[in-house]
Structure formats: structure tokens, C-alpha cells
Image (cartoon, rainbow, N blue to C red):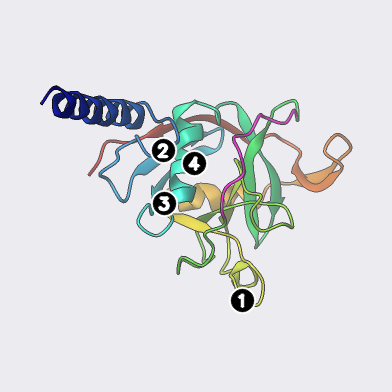
Amino acid sequence: MLKTFASIIFVLSVAVTSLAHAANKSDGSHIQPDNYYPRVKIETSMGDIVVELDRRRAPITVNNFLRYVDKRSYEDTIFHRIVPGFVVQGGGYTTDFEGKSNFPAIFNESGNGLTNDLHTIAMARQNDPHTANRQFFFNVNDNESLNPGRDWGYAVFGLIVEGEDVVDAMSEVETEYSLVLNANNVPIEPIVIKKVTVLPPL
């Protein structure tokens, strides 16, 4: 009888510990956990953008993005790559072109059925398909070349619902080659992400 009681106590303590661990998660899944379509507001030096994320189709990617938002890690970063008629990319560098720290890279969810259409948001990555961490980009065209086919594509995880004109204006700013980044397409006048916040559920 005592042995059975001790076993029950043990099972209950494991369950409570597991629940406590789940409650303390900081991987982004704790942010509006019952909301499949959380919205974030990105306040920039050129205006505000509201994006609706698709956690149902891209749960890993959305949770990863929300984790950076929750840590206020996108604040005072820039859009460092502007390619007219293609993409507006940012979230990885400070205004001094210093790289921000990353969480571990995530699995590429490019096969989720979402495509790189005009005004969608997707994850940037290196040549290896599973190297996305914090940088993201807005598509400013229907970029079929970024969708999965014979090779891995780029994971789309949301859509702009307000501020499309802001992103379109970003795509037209003057750019130059940057010695610091050793890259083309860097805006001459920095476009700064001032703040990113999760909006209340609709």
C-alpha cells in the first residue's frame, strides 16, 4: 500500500515538474499559445508594418520569430539588403553593422504550402537549407524562384496585413556597396527597426 502511494506521489511530482518546465519555455511557443495567427507590429524609421503570422503551417518558424520579438532582439536592427522588385531583408545587424547574436538555426519549413508571393514574410538563410535563425525578408514581388522545387526553398511564415506601402517604399531606396558588410544593395540611409511588438488577438 505504501509502495503504491509512493509511486503515485512520484508520478504526480514528475507531471508537475513537466508542466512547470512547459510553462517556463522561452522558445516562442509560450506567446499566445492558442493563437494560430498571431500578429506583430514592426515599427520602422519609414513607417509601421503589421504582419499576420501563420503558426498552423509554419509553427517552428513562427515560434522562432516570436522568440526574438519576445527578447526585444529586433529593436535597433536594420534592413541591410534591399533588392528592388525582389526582397527587403533585415533583422540581423545593428546600425553599426554589427551582427546580432542568434538562437540555434531552425528546420526549414519551406514545404508548408505557403509561397513567396508579393508582401509575404520569409526566413533568410545560407546555402544550407536549415541555417535560418533571425534574419527575415519581405517579398516585394511574386518570387517563384524562392519556392521549393528540386531544391529546398525559403520558408514563408506570414503575410503583411498593414503597411504594404511602407515595404514598397523601402524597396525603392538608394543603395550602395558596403565595405563593412562586403555586400551590395545596402541602403545609404539606414532603415531602422525601432520596435517589434505582439498585438492582442483579434
Range of residues picked out in magenta: 98-107
Residue at 23 percent across and 31 percent down: it is 11
Looking at numbered disc 1 in the image, what kind of residue is underneath it?
Answer: Gly
Q: Secondary structure at mark 3?
A: helix
Q: Is residue 78 above or below residue 2?
A: below
What kind of secondary structure does the magenta stretch mostly adopt? loop
Which quarter of the rendering shows the C terminus?
A: top left
Q: Is residue 100 magenta?
A: yes
Residue 59 marker:
3
Are the residues tagged 2 and 3 within 8 Å (C-beta)? no
Mark 2 closeness class: few <14, some 14–19, many ≥20 residues within 10 Å: some
Q: Which residue is mark 4?
A: 65
Residue at 35 percent across and 56 percent down: it is 56
Looking at numbered disc 2 in the image, what kind of residue is underneath it?
Answer: Lys
Q: Is residue 198 above or below residue 109?
A: above
Spatial CA span between label 4 and label 3: 10 Å
Please name which of the two marks, 4 or 2, marks the residue nearer to the observer. Answer: 4
Q: Which residue is mark 1?
A: 149
Disc with the residue nearer the chain's start (1 vs 2): 2
